[in-house]
Image: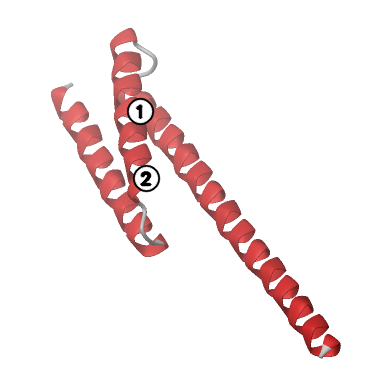
């Protein structure tokens, strides 16, 4: 009976360890993906400024407004994230919306 209990406890501890490492890996991947999105956002905003003619004060304000809008939507999305597939689809929608705003800005100039 003691052998069975020892094996049962050992199996339980091993399963907890596996669960811990799976969760740790998932969190690490989510953080990495968020950083990638932030870096991509910064790169897109910088490219908009360069295409529109440099660091003019009004363009800097537009840059900050777009960046804030994108970050707010991304935070809301992170709270509502249900799966990686849904998250990636929503990020693509935000990128399309962002590209549309970039096009609108170009057409105004």
- In the rendered image, the residue lying farthest to the top is 57
Residue at label 1? 67
Image-quadrant location for residue 42: top left
Query: Left of 107 or right of it: where is 49?
Result: right
Q: Is residue 55 left or right of residue 98?
A: right
Residue at the far right: name it: 3
Q: Which residue is mark 2?
A: 79
Q: Which residue is at a point 28% across and 19% down the rendered structure image? A: 62
Observer-nearest of 41 and 56 = 41
Counting from the top left corner in percent of width and height, residue 66 is at: 30, 27
How crowded pointer 1 is (Cα within 10 Å; few <14, some 14-19, many 20+) is rated as some
Q: Residue at x 38, y 25 (%)?
A: 50
Vertical position of residue 88 compared to residue 103: above or below: below
In front of the other: 14 or 33: 14
Label 1 or label 2, whichever lies nearer to me, is 2
Q: Position of residue 31 (x, y in %)?
A: 54, 47
Q: CA distance from mark 1 to mark 2?
A: 18 Å
Q: In the picture provided, is 62 more to the left or to the right than 100? A: right
Q: How many marks?
A: 2
In this orientation, which residue lies closer to the viewer: 23 or 98?
23
Q: Residue visible at 21% across and 34% down?
A: 101
Q: Is residue 102 left or right of residue 26?
A: left
């Amino acid at each position: 009976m003691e052998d069975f209990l020892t094996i049962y406890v050992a199996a339980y501890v091993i399963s907890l360890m596996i669960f811990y490492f799976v969760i740790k890996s998932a969190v690490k991947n989510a953080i990495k993906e968020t950083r990638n999105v932030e870096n991509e956002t910064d790169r897109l905003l910088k490219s908009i400024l360069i295409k529109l003619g440099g660091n003019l004060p009004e363009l800097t304000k537009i840059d900050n407004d777009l960046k804030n809008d994108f970050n707010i939507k991304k935070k809301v999305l992170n709270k509502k994230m249900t799966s990686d597939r849904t998250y990636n689809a929503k990020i693509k929608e935000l990128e399309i919306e962002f590209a549309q705003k970039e096009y609108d800005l170009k057409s105004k100039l």
